[in-house]
Image: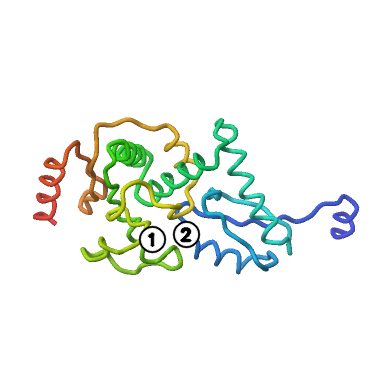
Amino acid sequence: YDILFKIRKGKSYLRKLTIVEGFQKYQLLELIKSSKLKHDYFEIKEYLIIADTYFYIKNENINSLLKKINRFALDFFNKKNINNIKDIKKIIIISSLVEKEGKDDLDKKLITSVIYNRLEKNMKLDIDATVIYSITKGEYKLNRKLNYSDLKYNSPYNTYKNRGLPPGPICFPGLNTIKIVLEKYKSPYYYYYYDENKNSHIFSKNYNDHIGKLNEYRKNK
């Protein structure tokens, strides 16, 4: 009866695919492989993917779902009067950095402000998450802490070696983080580091203040 009712009403059971905020390419590929989607050749446009829950029909082609995902991103930015792909890509890239670095909304706002402040001064961003992506290329999880030699890793994604933004996003950011980035929160900060004892980032206005706080933290670590 249920099957006949669905056929008569034209209803289909929808399955969902949830891209979690901060997921990387390898995690999305794992989701696709474990789904009921048809797998053939497909291209993941990382700069047009927002972490969210998407719905599909069993045996739907993966390219069909990816088009819906890309359209969701384009529609979101269109409502914000942002239609240029270069501008969209820039926002997604910054949001991916903030997604990987930030702990909560206030933290993300302050990190966003640091990124914009440093970009305005043509300073290197020096973001650890970009070093990790430089090594893994988003294809696996780096199961160790970064060391000093990693900061010299030769990659266009490494913001310790290159000025400006990396060429692409380092993860899939969520809507909340993108909205925070679009706010362009203002602060006087240019530096920050993560304090494991306080489980939060510590922000500074200048390099000397930053180094002073960082050295004090390392003594008490």
Q: Nearer the viewer, mark 1 or mark 2?
A: 1
Classify 25 as above or below 101: below
Instruction: Tell which of 2 and 40 is nearer to you.
Output: 40
Picture quadrant where residue 42 is located: bottom right
* Contact? badges 1 and 2 (CB < 8 Å): yes
- Front one among 24 and 16: 24
**SS at circle 1:** helix
Q: Which residue is mark 1?
A: 133
Q: Position of residue 112 (x, y in %)?
A: 35, 39
Q: Tell me the element at label 2.
A: loop
Q: Amino acid at mark 1?
A: Tyr
Q: Quadrant of the N terminus?
A: bottom right
Amino acid type, label 2: Gln
Question: From the viewer's perspective, is 109 left or right of 214?
Answer: right
Q: Position of residue 61 (x, y in %)?
A: 71, 61
Q: Quadrant of residue 116?
A: top left
For image coordinates 17% across by 38% down, the residue present is 206
CA gap between label 1 and label 2 equals 9 Å
Q: Is 115 left, or right, of 45 in this rendering?
A: left
Front residue (pair 125, 28): 125
The percent position of residue 94, horizontal first and vertical second, equals 41, 44
Where is residue 123 drawn, in percent x and y?
Answer: 26, 43
Question: Would residue 64 be found to the left or right of residue 156 on screen?
Answer: right
Q: Residue 24 has which mark?
A: 2
Quadrant location, the C terminus: bottom left
